[in-house]
Amino acid sequence: MKKLGNYALSLVLRGIGVISSLIPHQLLQKLGWVLGFILRVVSKKRYKITLINLQLAFPEKTTIWHQKTARDSYRNLGIVLAEILSFPHLNNSKLEKLIRFKNIELLQNAYSCNKGLLLLSGHYGNWELLAYSAGLLSNISINVVAIQQHNHYADEYITRFRTRHNNAVIPTANAAKKIVQTLLNHKAVAMLADQAADGTKDIFIEFFGRPAATYEAPAALALKFGVPIIIGFAKRNDDGIYYVELEEITHDDLEYSKDGIIELTKRHVRALEQAILEKPHLWAWQHNRWKQ
């Protein structure tokens, strides 16, 4: 029965994907708002977490601002969902029109050093489009570290999009060995590093003025193997187009040590903070980021 339910859900998602691929982009934005409203209504617990997170991050803001930004964050999730479901039905030329990189050559130049490459981002804007288009427009095969979906059919659907160009997927379960091998082979690895880590294993870094358990793996890998780090975020403008300005998180002044790992982690966390401050509603506040 559960398998049948998962299959039915996958059919619904595929149907939304077909509709999303056929309607004008401005109408797709409105469909995303509807999906975002549904997501907000069906999970009151997550909505409460969203409000608490915004209150913690922006204590100086008003209750009205917190509530509006929470709603807008859900709208962003709805838009991202509608877009992701439409991607398998769009050709590359249409996808390229949805996102513009200011300095894609930064990624290409870093990769040409033949040291491997770490690409970092967060659950901000449309992170799936960011990873796919970065590989497409740079002509670099990117290995995306991703959590496998519980719904097998949904996981298969999104994996087909993620790997449609030359990208590959590294499942997060037991991913460490595969990531190291990929970097040692001088290939590119992309990961999202903005969710709460294991406070007993990872490190606590100040995030919006409060200590948050943060994954140390990106910094540790970069310092241990001398791998460059490029960070970027897909920022959606009012016209529905995403704009990306890549930034290299330099670390040639740091050693592979605990202090070096902490400092480098602070640097990429600050880049995430800056993106969020610019457009707070584009980040997924629904995650319990400051859990201890």
Image (cartoon, rainbow, N blue to C red):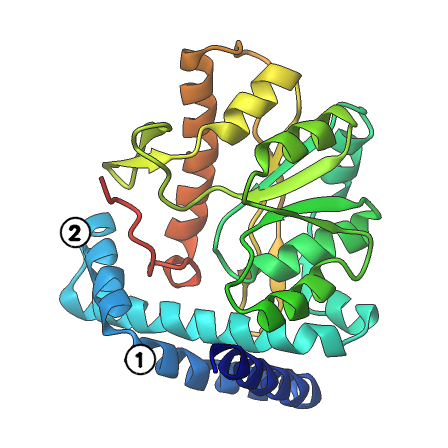
Image coordinates of residue 142 in percent, x first then y, are 73, 45
Distance, label 2 to label 1, CA atoms, is: 27 Å
Task: Give the label, 2 or 1, closer to the camera.
Answer: 1
Check residue 200 in the rendering and tell me which mark sits there, or answer none. none
Is residue 197 placed above or below 45 in the rendered structure? above
Residue drawn at point x = 44 percent, y = 61 percent: 282
Q: Quadrant of residue 203?
A: top left
Residue at image mark 2: 59
Image coordinates of residue 256 in percent, x first then y, are 53, 11
Q: How many marks?
A: 2
Residue closest to the eye, 220 or 237 = 220
- Label 2 sits on a secondary structure element that is loop
Tag 2: amino acid: Pro
Residue closest to the eye, 255 or 11 = 11
Residue drawn at point x = 41 percent, y = 75 percent: 75
Residue closest to the eye, 147 or 249 = 147
Quadrant of the frame with the C terminus:
top left
Mark closest to the chain's N terminus, 2 or 1: 1
Q: Quadrant of residue 45?
A: bottom left
Q: Is residue 137 left or right of residue 36?
A: right
Instruction: Tell me, yes or no, whether the two marked residues, 2 and 1, touch with CB atoms within 8 Å.
Output: no
Residue drawn at point x = 54 percent, y = 83 percent: 4
- Label 1 sits on a secondary structure element that is helix
Residue at image mark 1: 42
Residue 232 in view (yes/no): yes
